[in-house]
């Protein structure tokens, strides 16, 4: 939006130049550069106490006719304003501003100066280090914004990254609302080219977000894309190549070690050991060939499944602007191959943003993105997923059999764990192709001074077209192919009137009124057929199959209609007041009950503008803020939650009443239970905070404290089996409470010769509590659950007290079926002498106690070294992989274990914390206990980047205006005590953090070049 | 401002229509009418398939009750090792917690089915159909089965009918005996109102109700009623014993001969309606005849030994059997039904030689893979690939031989018509005798290798005490691995002693039984802990 302002300023300038005719003039000229020496484009140069001014060009040059002896006021967003005597050939270096109060912030349906904000808004620093290898902007946002918690997904495209603003306000959807160029969406950001983004702002508190009403309780993320600027045709090209390497793998048993461990585990269980690979002797004798004649192997399956992979990222843009308008055209190609073989994410996207001033009363514009991407992923976070299988496939099994085909563990080892290399290879032609068209067109009319009327029509189209080939993994399998096609279309029509009124230069009003109508429609079809004569990708089309064919599909819609208004009042830049009201009506609720009203009020006091506030060098600005407001959340998965429905089906509701053996009569069964009383859940939030800057605005500080209470939380209370299937319905039953604080510190050092540095630190904390679930239960869930009075997603189970060391200890312990020396001790919490369900308790909490992000940039001459750290502290991970890694009784008889079990407890190794090996689990050690919980606290160096900007002499030779090259390393190191591969595990239900073999994380090395003409 | 006003007014006009969106692809509760009745009936019957949502729920809480056979002395859990489907292992060694998956799935499957029955009943009662009583009787018979299954599996259950709010019912309102009385009342009504035949083979006639009534009455030792309702079935002339014991595993005999209360499985809808209850119970089969079966549910050595017969072809009823285990090399006589019940190394399995290669975890579970649910693998009716070994083979919850033996048992217990009792048992044995036929395909017997001998009980020595043993043994052999043994032991009152003796002796072969015990308190499964937790104190 700041570029819009520049266009506007330059437009003003041309208007003014026409009126200049006086004598006694001189020409001021020069170059304005930033701390690094690069020219500043679009800086404003004004003659003091006049309307005379200009803006700098692409190279930072300006030329201005001024009165003799004039003073120039030079300003640029993000930099400190300076005043200098006008002269020719000026060399001006601007100093960065740690806290620019004139920065324009995009808020709901309008913009505000940062100085005028009364709510809690975080602004992303778009100049900081970003991921070069990851196509998804969310990865780059991680850790950058106080109170915005992002857990990234390491799979190509990061499609399952999650984002939480100020903790979790509900047990339902906690995803924020995205507003891209004024149009609301909830779609994943992975289709968006990060290079197209001009600014990102997060509206965190209710007062700033309530203008978005029923969808704003989880925060609003406002993304504005770039517009043409610079008064001249500019071409920018950025290319980077990144090598992603496997950061860490599990240390597993080799084939010989496996046999030994298995023998021990059988003997400990009193079972005579026997295994097709190791015979049935007293000691394991690894066979030389397997049952099909294939030589036995010693396979490291993780090495077979993962390898280093490249990302290529090419972005280019062309832009221009003039007093008549602006245009920007950009394109992006990114291809991210995954560490897991055969997986990738590839995206092509183009963008056209333009606007045109038809007259001084009318302006039209549009933003349009078309993006096409495809990706191939595989099951992760699943014990049948590839990472889990790669970890546990048996090492004696080779990847390939003697005849060159894939070895089949199912026949070789009576295993039900497939060969992961084969699974990946069999899926090599699977394709998930998606398109997204996202854009808006608008008309702005300025009929009288201060009044802007705007009509904005937004459109979003998302479609997917998936093809999955099921090739045979063994001869008895049946080949099949399934296709799925779906599309979602959203129309958003927004009309606003915005009137700015200034009275006596003291009272400033900003009125906003508007209406918004949104309609969403989803449509999908799917088809399946089996029995294909050939497994060829070209052959395997639905028409070519010979077997069963099925199809499916459906449609779904919702709509929203809203009225909203906002009034801002500013008295002499000292007292700021704001009031917002929005009324939403939705199709998702019963018609008598479908509206909700969301009010908000906020105020701020800029103490530093008061006359009594001493002008000093230490405290430059001080603003106190207080805000209260309400937001809604309609994140229920059922668009028709008020209806009780029945569905005819040929699935499990049908029956072969006629006894045909191969046909069924369709049945009618309960599909959903409706609730006509359903309404929005409402989150009420109170925010207090202050903004301050110190020491010539080199140091800035923002602090916020908030209380967030969610009432009428939508829950699906559990039903008893006696109520039948699908008896559960959405109800407004729960209460949740969050409170927390956020602190942002920014610093820009002075220039020490050729050196300067800047840094920013954000720290945040939240405390979450489920106050009430519903009238039926005080807890929902199993190993991780919701419990009234506790934070969301706490882990629940038995307390593990180490291992029994002596028979005496065993005898003295409570009744615990299966107990014995070397086995796990579970605590008899209720002291009733028996280990039973009543001994379960809360074991841990997945919510971090503290989150932080730290950015440090060092500038020296043309060099910049940037680092970024992110960390979360004081949270627990439920590491389910430990069952597989440490227990021979888990996961089938022919799967691999961690090399750590060689050190398991035995009578001669009693100091071990790993239970004695056994193939049976009579002690029920797989039950949930704190054996499977680990502290996940970590500090990661996410990025380190070294960039070099070529000096002007080189640029001249290339006819370029800017050229820089850079090297970057991502996921540099992690400091953690967590035993799994990476403590950053995806968020599961209720915000729990469960390690079930997520996609492995890479360490990435990037080289890139950025060139501007 | 004008434009905004236009926008406002347009929006306001549009919104009432725009916001009135109806569910797509479904009908609402208000749209249920008379035409919906037959489809609601179909879904109520589909409750018998026990396949409401996932496959785990089906095989861990199966209507076939194979997991209850695993609790008894008849069967092992099987599979790749003791850790696979650990909850069923816990059932096998009788180490049962209220969070055992079988408790939950057994509970859910039956109550979901009852809920469907009640939805159909209410729709019938609200309809303008003419003959409501007959339709309601079919549903009452269904309901009777589901409550019967719950009542004999769980410590205590909630009972309610179609007019009551199920969410307000406790598990302590009625005793087991009171619930059996309610079940019987449903069945009496059904017997009175159901037709003798149905045009659709899968729907219940009055003899289904009678057969179930006989079974429920046996559970409560109401022997006179057992005889009354068994006679109703027998005298109907609609049922007969199979010519060959192996016929129960052939599609051609679905709904024929012995089939009384049958679940209609089918391969419709891409195999969504095959017997998922027995999904895991397909032999591993060297050579992939049955795909890669999971090889769960194996006969115990104790069961196999029970098929030993003496020189007269009679089972050993006085503990005087030879001590040698039956195996490929056993030289004593055996009842031929052994080789229709389990696979045995060296013997044919549906026409193919069964070898050690068919045994998935020989060292843990031995060799006796269950046979009864598998049809001839060379039959065009068998599904190739997943789900392994599947077909449209029905499962008989009650078959004719069961009714004959229940009547015989009742006569023995009442000590009346003892000769009739002996004749009924002998009818069943005659079927076994005539099944010794090496030409009958698919071949499961090898008379050249085994000494098949099955004889009839003579009149001499047929005292009440001996007859009781004979009938009980006949039930074990005839109905082996069909989900009856555990419940028979429970109703005979000797589950605890029998199973403890069994686990102690079987531990010599199957070491995982070491130290396992069954107490009286563990005979019935506890109400699933999650249901108790969610019940607001209604469930104990």
Image: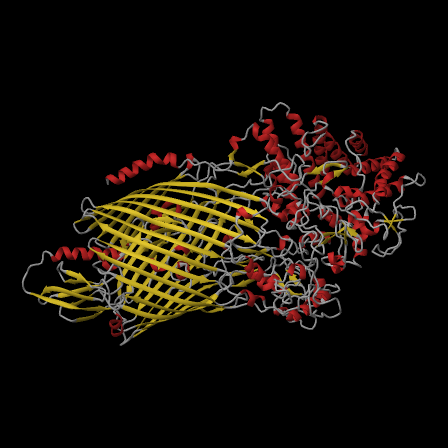
**Is residue A166 visible to us here?**
no
Name, please, the residue furthest toward the top.
B130
Is A547 drawn above or below residue A406 in the view shown? above
For the N terminus of chain B, the image quarter is top left
Residue in the foreground of this view, choosing between A56 and A277: A277
For the C terminus of chain B, the image quarter is top right
Name, please, the residue furthest toward the right.
B460
Q: Position of residue A107 (x, y in %)?
A: 31, 52
**Is residue A947 visible to us here?**
yes
Is A882 drawn above or below residue B469 in the view shown? below
Q: At 72% across and 46% down in the image, what residue appears? A: B375
Q: Position of residue B535 (x, y in %)?
A: 59, 43
Is A748 drawn above or below residue A585 in the view shown? below
Q: At 60% across and 31% down in the image, what residue appears? A: B38
Is A825 situated left or right of A685 in this image? right
Q: At 74% across and 42% down in the image, what residue appears? A: B250
Q: Quadrant of residue B15?
A: top left
Is A334 situated left or right of A14 in this image? right
Is A1004 situated left or right of B164 in this image? left
Q: Quadrant of residue A869?
A: bottom left
Name, please, the residue furthest toward the bottom.
A753
Residue in the foreground of this view, choosing between A976 and A555: A555
Q: Position of residue A377 (x, y in %)?
A: 50, 57
Is A516 drawn above or below residue A576 in the view shown? above
Q: Position of residue A422 (x, y in %)?
A: 58, 60
């Amino acid at each position: 939006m700041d570029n819009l302002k520049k266009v506007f300023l330059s437009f003003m300038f041309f208007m003014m130049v026409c009126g200049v005719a006086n004598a006694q003039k001189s020409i001021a000229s020069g170059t304005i550069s930033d701390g690094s020496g690069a020219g500043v484009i679009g800086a404003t140069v004004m003659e003091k106490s006049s309307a005379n001014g200009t803006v700098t060009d692409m190279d930072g040059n300006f030329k201005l006719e001024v009165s003799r002896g004039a003073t120039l006021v030079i300003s640029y967003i993000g930099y400190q304003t300076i005043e200098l005597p006008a002269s020719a050939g000026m060399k001006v270096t601007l100093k960065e501003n740690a806290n620019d109060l004139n920065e324009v912030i995009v808020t709901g349906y309008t913009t505000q100066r940062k100085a005028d904000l009364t709510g809690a808004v975080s602004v992303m620093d778009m100049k900081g280090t970003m991921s070069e290898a990851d196509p998804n902007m969310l990865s780059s946002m991680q850790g950058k914004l106080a109170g915005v918690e992002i857990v990234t997904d390491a799979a190509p495209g990061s499609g399952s990254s999650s984002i939480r603003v100020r903790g979790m306000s509900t047990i339902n959807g906690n995803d924020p609302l995205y507003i891209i160029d004024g149009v609301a969406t909830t779609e994943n950001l992975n289709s968006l080219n990060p290079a197209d983004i001009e600014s990102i702002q997060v509206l965190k508190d209710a007062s700033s977000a309530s203008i978005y009403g029923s969808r704003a309780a989880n925060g609003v993320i406002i993304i504005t894309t770039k517009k043409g600027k610079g008064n001249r045709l500019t071409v920018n090209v950025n290319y980077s190549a990144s090598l992603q390497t496997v950061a860490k793998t599990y240390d597993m048993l080799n084939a010989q070690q496996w046999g030994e461990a298995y023998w021990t585990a059988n003997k400990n269980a009193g079972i005579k050991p026997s295994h097709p690979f190791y015979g049935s002797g007293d000691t394991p004798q690894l066979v030389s060939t397997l049952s099909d004649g294939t030589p036995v192997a010693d396979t490291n399956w993780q090495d077979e499944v993962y390898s280093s992979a490249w990302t290529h990222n090419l972005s280019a843009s062309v832009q221009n602007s003039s007093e008549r308008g602006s245009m920007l055209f950009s394109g992006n190609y990114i291809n991210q191959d995954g560490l897991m073989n055969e997986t990738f994410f590839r995206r092509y996207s183009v963008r056209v943003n333009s606007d045109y001033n038809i007259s001084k009363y009318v302006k039209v514009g549009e933003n349009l993105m078309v993006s096409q991407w495809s990706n191939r992923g595989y099951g992760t976070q699943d014990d049948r997923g590839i990472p889990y299988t790669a970890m546990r496939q048996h090492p004696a099994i080779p990847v390939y059999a003697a005849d060159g085909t894939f070895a089949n563990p199912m026949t070789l080892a009576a295993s039900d764990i497939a060969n992961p290399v084969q699974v990946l290879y069999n899926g090599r032609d699977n394709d998930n192709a998606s398109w997204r068209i996202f854009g808006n067109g608008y008309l702005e009319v300025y009929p009288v001074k201060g009044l802007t009327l705007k009509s904005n029509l937004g459109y979003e189209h998302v479609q997917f077209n998936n093809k999955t080939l099921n090739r045979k993994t063994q001869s008895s399998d049946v080949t099949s192919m399934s296709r799925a096609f779906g599309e979602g279309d959203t129309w958003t029509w927004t009309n606003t009137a915005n009137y700015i009124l200034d009275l006596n230069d003291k009272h400033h009003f900003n009125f906003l009124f508007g209406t918004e109508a949104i309609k969403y429609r989803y449509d999908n079809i799917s088809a399946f057929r089996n029995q294909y004569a050939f497994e060829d990708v070209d052959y395997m089309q639905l028409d070519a199959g010979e077997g069963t064919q099925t199809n499916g599909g459906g449609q779904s819609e919702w709509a929203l209609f809203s009225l909203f208004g906002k009034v801002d009042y500013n008295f002499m830049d000292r007292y700021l007041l704001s009031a917002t009201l929005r009324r939403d009506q939705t199709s998702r609720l019963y018609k008598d009950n479908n509206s909700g009203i969301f009010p908000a009020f906020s105020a701020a006091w800029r103490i530093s503008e008061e006359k009594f506030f001493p002008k000093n060098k230490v405290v430059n600005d001080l603003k106190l803020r207080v805000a209260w407001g309400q937001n809604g959340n309609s994140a229920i998965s059922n668009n028709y939650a008020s209806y009780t429905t029945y569905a005819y089906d040929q699935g499990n509701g049908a029956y072969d009443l006629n006894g045909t053996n191969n046909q069924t009569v369709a049945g009618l069964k309960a599909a959903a239970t409706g609730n006509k009383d359903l309404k929005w859940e409402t989150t009420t939030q109170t925010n207090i905070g202050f903004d301050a800057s110190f020491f010539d605005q080199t140091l800035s500080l923002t602090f916020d404290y908030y209380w967030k209470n969610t009432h009428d939380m939508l829950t699906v209370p559990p039903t008893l089996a006696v109520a039948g299937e699908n008896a559960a319905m959405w109800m407004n039953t729960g209460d949740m409470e969050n409170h927390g604080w956020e602190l942002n510190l920014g610093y820009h050092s002075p220039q020490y010769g050729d050196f300067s540095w800047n840094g920013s630190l954000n720290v945040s904390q939240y405390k979450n509590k489920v106050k009430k679930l519903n009238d039926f239960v005080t807890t929902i869930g199993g190993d991780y659950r919701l419990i009234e009075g506790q934070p969301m997603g706490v882990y629940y189970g038995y307390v593990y007290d180490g291992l029994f060391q002596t028979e005496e200890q065993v005898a003295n312990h409570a009744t615990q079926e299966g107990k014995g020396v070397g086995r796990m001790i579970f605590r008899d919490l209720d002291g009733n002498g028996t280990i039973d369900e009543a001994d379960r308790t809360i074991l841990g909490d997945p919510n971090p106690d503290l989150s932080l992000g730290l950015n440090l940039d060092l500038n020296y001459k043309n060099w910049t070294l940037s680092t970024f750290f992110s960390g979360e502290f004081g949270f627990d991970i439920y590491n389910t992989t430990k069952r597989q890694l440490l227990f021979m009784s888990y996961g089938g008889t022919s799967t691999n274990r961690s090399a750590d079990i060689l050190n398991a407890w035995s009578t001669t190794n009693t100091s071990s914390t790993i239970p004695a090996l056994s193939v049976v689990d009579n002690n029920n050690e797989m039950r949930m206990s704190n054996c499977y919980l680990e502290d996940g606290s970590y500090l990661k160096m996410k990025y380190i980047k070294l960039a070099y900007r070529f000096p002007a002499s080189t640029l001249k030779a290339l006819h370029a205006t800017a050229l820089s090259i850079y090297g970057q390393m991502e996921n540099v190191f992690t400091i953690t005590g967590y035993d799994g591969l990476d403590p950053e595990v995806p968020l599961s239900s209720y915000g729990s953090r469960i390690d079930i073999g997520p996609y492995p994380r890479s360490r990435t090395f990037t080289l890139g070049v950025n060139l501007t003409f | 401002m004008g434009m905004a006003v236009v926008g406002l007014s347009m929006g306001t006009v549009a919104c009432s229509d725009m916001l009135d969106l109806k569910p797509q692809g479904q009908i609402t509760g208000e749209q249920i009418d008379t035409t919906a009745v037959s489809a609601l009936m179909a879904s109520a019957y589909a409750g018998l398939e026990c396949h409401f949502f996932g496959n785990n729920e089906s095989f861990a809480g199966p209507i076939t009750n194979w997991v209850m056979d695993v609790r008894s002395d008849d069967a092992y859990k099987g599979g790749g090792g003791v850790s696979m489907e650990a909850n069923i292992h816990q059932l096998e060694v009788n180490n049962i917690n209220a969070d055992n998956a079988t408790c939950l799935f057994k509970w859910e499957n039956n109550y979901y089915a009852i809920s469907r029955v009640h939805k159909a009943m209410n729709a019938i009662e609200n309809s303008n159909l003419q003959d409501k009583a007959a339709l309601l009787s079919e549903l009452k018979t269904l309901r009777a089965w589901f409550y019967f299954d719950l009542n004999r599996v769980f410590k205590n259950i909630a009972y309610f009918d179609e007019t009551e709010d199920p969410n307000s019912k406790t598990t302590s309102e009625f005793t087991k005996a009171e619930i059996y009385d309610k079940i019987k009342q449903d069945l009496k009504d059904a017997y009175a109102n159901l037709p003798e035949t149905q045009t659709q083979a899968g729907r219940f006639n009055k003899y289904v109700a009678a057969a179930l009534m006989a079974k429920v009455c046996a559970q409560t030792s109401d022997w006179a009623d057992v005889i009354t309702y068994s006679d109703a079935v027998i005298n109907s002339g609609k049922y007969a014993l199979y010519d060959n014991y192996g016929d129960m595993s052939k599609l051609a005999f679905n709904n024929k001969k012995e089939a009384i209360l049958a679940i209609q499985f089918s391969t419709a809808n891409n195999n969504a309606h095959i017997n998922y209850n027995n999904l895991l119970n397909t032999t591993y089969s060297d050579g992939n005849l049955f795909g890669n079966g999971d090889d769960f549910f194996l006969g115990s050595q104790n069961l196999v030994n029970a098929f030993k017969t003496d020189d007269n072809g009679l089972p050993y009823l006085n503990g005087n059997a030879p001590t040698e285990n039956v195996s490929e090399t056993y030289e004593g006589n055996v009842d031929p039904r052994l080789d229709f019940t389990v696979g045995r190394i060296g013997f044919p399995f549906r026409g193919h030689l069964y070898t050690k290669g068919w045994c998935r975890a020989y060292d843990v579970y031995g060799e006796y893979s269950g046979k009864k649910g598998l049809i001839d693998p060379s039959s065009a009716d068998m599904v190739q690939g997943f789900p392994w070994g599947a077909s449209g083979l029905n499962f008989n919850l009650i078959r004719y031989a069961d009714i004959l033996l229940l009547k015989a048992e009742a006569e023995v217990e009442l000590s009346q018509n003892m000769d009739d009792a002996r004749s009924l048992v002998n009818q069943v044995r005659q079927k076994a005798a005539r099944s010794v036929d090496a030409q009958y395909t698919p071949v499961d017997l090898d008379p050249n290798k085994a000494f098949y001998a099955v004889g009839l009980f003579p009149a001499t020595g047929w005292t009440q005490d001996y007859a009781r043993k004979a009938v009980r043994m006949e039930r074990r052999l005839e109905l082996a691995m069909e989900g009856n043994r555990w419940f028979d032991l429970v109703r005979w009152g000797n589950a605890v002693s029998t199973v403890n003796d069994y686990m102690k002796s079987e531990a010599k072969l199957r070491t995982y039984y070491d130290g396992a015990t069954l107490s009286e308190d563990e005979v019935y499964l506890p109400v699933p802990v999650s249901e108790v937790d969610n019940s607001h104190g209604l469930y104990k």
